[in-house]
Structures are given as structure tokens and as C-alpha cells.
Image (cartoon, rainbow, N blue to C red):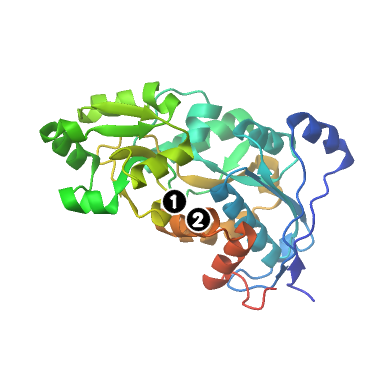
């Protein structure tokens, strides 16, 4: 039936097997959803075109990877799944070598990790344009327009603590801690404690004191904030544990932390051959934001739901694909 696509298991071309094995990549069996069009309608130019979608190996990336697969399947493409690639470098290599055709990436990661800059650009639009232009010129990679979804750093506390002390921004936190230095107990990752775009740089920018800094793994930080081990901690602004543990995100009102807006990225030759990919993916990018992703991540990381089903249900709820998806 025209306009209905089943997302099948990813089968890489024989020429790619050695590279995938060398990078530690392995193909996944995609969730066997039958996809019918919704507001994303069949696109004749994509009918039957094989497109492989990749993602990194954490919840948010897997969710948006499935969203891309569902969108492209609704448009008529034959989609192959290579989500859950271990590590940013492997994901980047898979895109550049053609083992995947598109993925979602973050502007800050592109600018700092891939293009080698040390100073982030505070403005979201300017950061996007800079990485878009340089990555295309240097590496032939096309960044589609960025989403409001911005998975950057922030300081978090519990909602109860924030409400008790009227804390909404990092500047609020600074003024509070200057008056109450005994409350300046922070939980952060080891790297964040010493990195210049982490705690030391944030302290220089805002001027808050630290009475005690405890270092933990990422997951333990969220738990440490929630159980009172620390009053403040380093968090990622789209993490589902924010909602699951009733945490509050303090606005980085001085724009210290780098911008990490998410974008679809593909090779320029793929974009030139199938520019219609942009019209398929852009409504999905525009529908994503931090609040949406926090709730979606909570369903996976806190409630234990399957990320493929969570992504599918979101796509149906937004009307992008048909409600009779099974």
C-alpha cells in the first residue's frame, strides 16, 4: 500500500562491514512499526529511497533517531536503523564515511569537539550559523536549521529548595549563596569541576562561592540533588530525571554555558540528491523543545518505557504519522 512503510532491521552494505566493526558499531533491529502518513505525507522523490539513520548511545539521541526514522518512513523512504552508536567520534565517522545518511547533532559539539574551537558563541543563531558554515566548507556536512531543543549545562536544585529561596536563575543562586555560604554545596562530575567551561568558568562569570564540591558520576548527581547530599548540581537541561526527581533548572541568565541546539546533519551530496529530506524533518525539529524532551526522557529513564514506543507515540500525538501505527 503506497504511503505505508515498515521500518526494518538495518543491514549495512558489505563494503561497510569492516569499518563498522573497526569502530565498534553494530546494527540494531529496528522497532517493527508500520508507519502511515499523517501531516508528513509521501514525498515522490523519496519513494523507495534507502536511508540509514544513526544516533549516539544515550536516551535523547535514541529518541530523536527513532523520530527521524518514523518521519522518513511516512514520507516513503525505506529506512534502516543504526541508532545507539557508541560515542560521538564513531557517530561522526559513520556519517562522514556514508555508513549512515543522517543523524542529529548539537551545535556546541560541532563547534568545540569536531571543529576544534575553544570559545563557544553565546547566541544560539550565531552559534548555529558558524558551525553550519564551517562544517560545510571544511567537511561537506550540511546542518539543517536548528531546533529550540538545547541540551546544554545548567545548575539544578530541587523544586522545593528553589521555591523556598525564590531561585529562578543562576544569578539568583549567586546572590543567595553570597548571603548563605554554608549552603554552597555542589555535586558535579570530576571533569566539570576543573574544566574552564565548567565550574571554574561559571564561578568567574557569576561570582558564587563554593563551600564544598562533591564529585560523582552523572546519574549520582541527580540523585544527590534530590536526596539533599548537595543543594546544587551540574545537570543537562533536557534530562528526564529533572521531571522524575522534581528538580528545578536554574536559568543560565548570563549565557555562560555553550549552546547545544540540536540539528539534523547529513552529507552535502545526500542533501543535493534528496533536498526533500529537509521539508520532512524540519516540522519535527520545530516541534522539539526542552520541556517536551524532559517528559519524553522521563518516560524512558524513570518510567522504564521503550524509547521506540515513546518516540512513536509522540509522533502520533503531534499528528506527524497516522494514529493506526502498530
Q: Nearer the viewer, residue 115 or 20?
A: 20
Q: Are marks 2 and 1 in contact (CB under 8 Å)?
A: yes
Q: Is residue 125 visible?
A: no
Indicate left or right for 1 with 213 as reference: right
**Which structural element holds mark 2?**
loop
Rendering quarter of residue 268:
top right
Indicate left or right for 111 with 312 as reference: left
Q: In x, y percent, where is residue 53?
A: 69, 49
**Which structural element holds mark 1?**
helix
Indicate left or right for 99 with 225 as reference: right
For image coordinates 68% across by 38% down, the residue present is 95
Q: Quadrant of the C terminus?
A: bottom right
Rendering quarter of residue 261:
top left
Indicate left or right for 99 with 310 as reference: right
Task: Give residue 302's mark.
Answer: 2
Q: Which residue is mark 1?
A: 241
Q: Nearer the viewer, residue 226 or 112?
A: 226
Q: In x, y percent, where is residue 197?
A: 37, 27
Work out whether mark 2 precedes mark 1 in sequence or the reverse, and give the earlier one. Answer: 1
Amino acid at each position: 500500500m503506497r504511503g505505508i512503510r515498515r521500518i526494518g532491521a538495518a543491514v549495512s552494505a558489505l563494503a561497510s562491514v569492516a569499518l563498522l566493526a573497526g569502530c565498534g558499531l553494530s546494527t540494531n533491529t529496528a522497532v517493527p512499526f508500520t508507519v502511515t502518513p499523517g501531516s508528513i505525507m509521501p514525498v515522490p522523490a523519496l519513494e523507495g529511497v534507502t536511508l540509514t539513520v544513526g544516533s549516539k548511545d544515550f536516551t535523547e539521541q535514541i529518541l530523536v533517531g527513532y523520530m527521524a526514522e518514523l518521519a522518513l518512513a511516512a514520507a516513503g523512504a525505506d529506512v534502516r536503523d543504526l541508532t545507539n552508536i557508541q560515542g560521538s567520534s564513531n557517530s561522526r565517522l559513520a556519517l562522514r564515511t556514508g555508513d549512515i545518511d543522517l543523524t542529529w547533532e548539537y551545535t556546541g559539539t560541532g563547534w568545540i569537539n569536531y571543529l576544534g574551537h575553544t570559545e563557544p558563541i553565546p547566541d544560539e543563531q550565531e552559534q548555529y550559523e558558524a558551525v553550519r558554515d564551517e562544517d560545510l566548507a571544511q567537511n561537506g556536512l550540511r546542518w539543517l536549521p536548528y531546533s529550540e531543543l538545547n541540551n546544554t549545562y545548567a545548575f539544578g536544585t530541587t523544586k522545593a529548595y528553589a521555591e523556598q529561596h525564590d531561585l529562578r536563575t543562576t544569578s539568583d543562586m549567586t546572590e543567595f549563596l553570597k548571603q548563605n555560604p554554608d549552603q554552597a554545596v555542589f555535586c558535579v562530575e570530576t571533569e566539570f569541576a576543573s574544566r574552564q567551561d565548567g565550574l571554574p568558568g561559571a564561578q568567574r562569570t557569576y561570582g558564587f562561592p563554593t563551600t564544598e564540591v562533591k564529585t560523582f558520576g552523572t546519574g549520582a548527581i541527580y540523585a544527590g540533588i534530590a536526596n539533599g547530599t548537595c543543594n546544587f548540581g551540574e545537570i543537562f537541561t533536557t534530562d528526564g530525571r529533572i521531571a522524575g526527581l522534581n528538580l528545578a533548572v536554574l536559568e543560565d541568565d548570563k549565557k555562560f554555558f555553550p549552546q547545544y541546539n540540536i540539528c539534523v546533519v547529513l552529507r552535502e551530496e545526500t542533501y543535493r540528491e534528496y533536498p526533500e529530506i529537509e521539508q520532512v524533518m524540519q516540522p519535527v525539529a520545530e516541534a522539539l523543545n526542552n520541556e517536551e524532551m524532559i517528559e519524553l526522557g522521563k518516560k524512558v529513564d524513570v518510567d522504564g518505557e521503550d524509547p521506540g514506543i515513546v518516540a512513536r507515540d509522540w509522533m502520533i500525538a503531534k499528528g506527524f504519522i497516522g494514529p493506526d501505527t502498530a
